[in-house]
């Protein structure tokens, strides 16, 4: 089972400055070195700018993913933003390499789907995945996603778009 813990602005700011101890204190959980990689720092910069523009995204975006009952942070997950006016949310998850291949991505996905289903305004859950990302494609398999198209992402290149009803 996965429990999500908010990464408040002070935690993300501390992560940008390689201050893992301060970030962990602000989040209330022990974060790992995975949270201060260059790739992660790019995410924190993006999310902090997003929150500056629109603080209403805070309940939806990135969270630390804590595996229970052990209480170990195994990665991060959330949605790209609050629901669109049409009721769509897009999932995002990433497992710390030290904790991969143990079912954590699937547990994160299950928790994200439950979160989306708990919100009446959410109608559709979307996943955008590189066609070369076999692990993520396998993670969403069996969860009701249907391929609905593709897009070009400036950072990630070609992505397949999958959707499923939230409820």
Image (cartoon, rainbow, N blue to C red):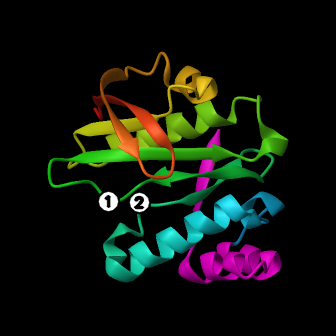
For residue 33, what is the image quadrant?
Answer: bottom right
| Residue at image point 79% right, 75% down | 20
Q: Can you give x and y, in whole percent of width and height, for residue 165 in the image?
A: 27, 30
Measured Cα–Cα span from mark 1 to mark 2: 5 Å
Q: Position of residue 137 (x, y in %)?
A: 53, 24
**Label tally:** 2
Q: Residue 1 vs residue 57: left or right?
A: right
Q: Against 39, is 134 above or below? A: above
Residue furthest to the left: 86
Q: Residue at x 70, y 75 (%)?
A: 15
Q: Label 2 near label 1: C-beta < 8 Å?
A: yes
* Res 103 quadrant in image: top right
Rendered position, 78 above or below 162? below
Quadrant of the rendering where the N terminus is positioned? top right
Q: Residues within 10 Å of mark 1 (few under 14, many from 20)?
A: some
Q: Residue at x 61, y 50 (%)?
A: 3
- Regarding residue 11, the answer to whether it shows in the image is yes
Q: Is residue 118 visible?
A: no
The one nearer the camera, 154 or 2, is 154
Q: Which residues are magenta?
A: 1-27
Q: Which mark is residue 82?
A: 1
Dot 2: few (<14), some (14–19), or many (≥20) neighbours within 10 Å? many
Residue 100's disc number = none
Residue 128 image point, x, y percent: 42, 37
- State the mark number for residue 60: 2
Instruction: Look at 51% across and 45% down and name the residue there.
Output: 156
């Amino acid at each position: 089972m996965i429990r999500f813990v908010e990464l408040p602005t002070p935690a993300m700011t501390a992560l940008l400055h390689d201050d893992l101890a301060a970030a962990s204190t602000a989040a209330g959980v022990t974060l790992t070195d995975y949270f201060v990689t260059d790739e992660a720092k790019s995410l924190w910069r993006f999310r902090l700018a997003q929150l500056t523009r629109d603080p209403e995204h805070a309940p939806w975006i990135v969270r630390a993913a804590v595996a229970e009952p052990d209480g170990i942070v195994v990665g991060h997950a959330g949605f790209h933003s609050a629901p669109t006016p049409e009721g769509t949310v897009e999932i995002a998850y990433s497992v710390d390499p030290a904790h991969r291949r143990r079912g954590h991505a699937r547990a994160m996905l299950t928790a994200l789907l439950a979160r989306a289903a708990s919100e009446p305004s959410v109608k559709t859950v979307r996943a955008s995945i590189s066609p070369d990302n076999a692990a993520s494609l396998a993670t969403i398999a069996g969860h009701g996603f249907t391929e609905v198209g593709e897009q070009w992402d400036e950072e990630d290149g070609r992505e397949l778009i999958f959707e499923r009803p939230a409820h």
